Amino acid sequence: DPEGRPGPWTPMRELAPGTDRWGAEVTPGAPGRWTYHVEAWSDPVATWRHTAAVKVPAGIDAGLVLEEGAELHTRAAAGVPEGPERATVLDAVRVMEDDSLPVMTRLAAALTPEVTEVLARHPLRELVTSSDPLPLQVERERALYGAWYEFFPRSEGTPEQPHGTFATAARRLPAIAAMGFDVVYLPP
């Protein structure tokens, strides 16, 4: 914000799937000069999910893929606050590590919507990079729709008093407002 306080983390979303274009919407709370930065990182869990969805059903290195998935999910769980969300991820790890279960059951444990939602809120971030601070000028709301009228008070004179004053210029304000202008700019 303009006071220099850090704001909340706002995750970006893919704007058009498959195009690698990402965006986020934020609403600044006050006018002023703001700054923000963009962070990017690799997502090893998403990469693993893609690989596992191909290899495990095909029977290619299924045990190794599930072992790697359990290790990644254990690391990811360390970044989830203590509580039910962390337990959800660790339950999936226990199932992935259970060699007595069919490989597809073990894989399914990692791909549940609950695990996906937890890891979306608390991603395992590797290779993090951050942009330099980027400027954002936030104007007052009236700047969105204000119509400015510029005039010189000295030009608002009369034949009797050729050089206008602020008093003579003030008489012109209703006519300016009738034209739809709501801001009068008086140049120096």
Image (cartoon, helix red, strand yellow):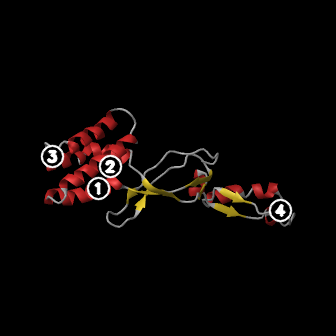
Question: Is 9 left or right of 56, judged from the image as shown?
Answer: right
- Can residue 92 be seen here? The reply is yes
Q: Please report contact status of discs 2 and 4: CB closer than 8 Å, yes or no.
A: no
Q: Amino acid at mark 3?
A: Thr
The CA span between labels 1 and 2 is: 8 Å
Residue receiving disc 3: 105
- Sequence-wise first label, 1 or 2: 1
Percent x, y of residue 90: 29, 39
Q: Which residue is mark 2?
A: 72
Q: Are marks 1 and 2 in contact (CB under 8 Å)?
A: yes
Q: Of callouts 2 and 3, which one flags the residue occurring earlier in the amino acid sequence?
A: 2
Q: Residues within 10 Å of mark 4 (few under 14, many from 20)?
A: some
The circle on residue 140 is: none
Residue 88: quadrant of the picture: top left
Residue identified by numbered label 1: 48
Binning the other alpha carbons within 10 Å of mark 2 as few (below 14), some (14 to 19) or many (20 upward) gives some
For discs 4 and 3, the disc positioned in front in the rendered view: 3
Q: Which residue is mark 4?
A: 164
Nearer to us of marks 2 and 3 is: 2
Disc 3 and disc 1 in contact, CB within 8 angstroms: no
Residue at screen point 30% across, 35% down? 87
Alpha-carbon distance for marks 2 and 4?
A: 77 Å
Q: CA distance from mark 1 to mark 4?
A: 76 Å
- What's the residue type where badge 1 is placed? Trp
Q: Marks 4 and 1: in contact by CB < 8 Å?
A: no
User: Are the two marked residues, 4 and 3, in contact with CB atoms closer than 8 angstroms?
Assistant: no
Q: Is residue 61 left or right of residue 42?
A: left
Q: Residue 126 at x, y = what percent?
A: 42, 54
Q: Secondary structure at mark 1?
A: helix
Element under disc 3: helix
Please give the name of the residue rendered at 15% of the width and 50% of the height, measured from the top-left corner.
104
Q: Of label 2 and label 4, which has the lower sequence position?
A: 2
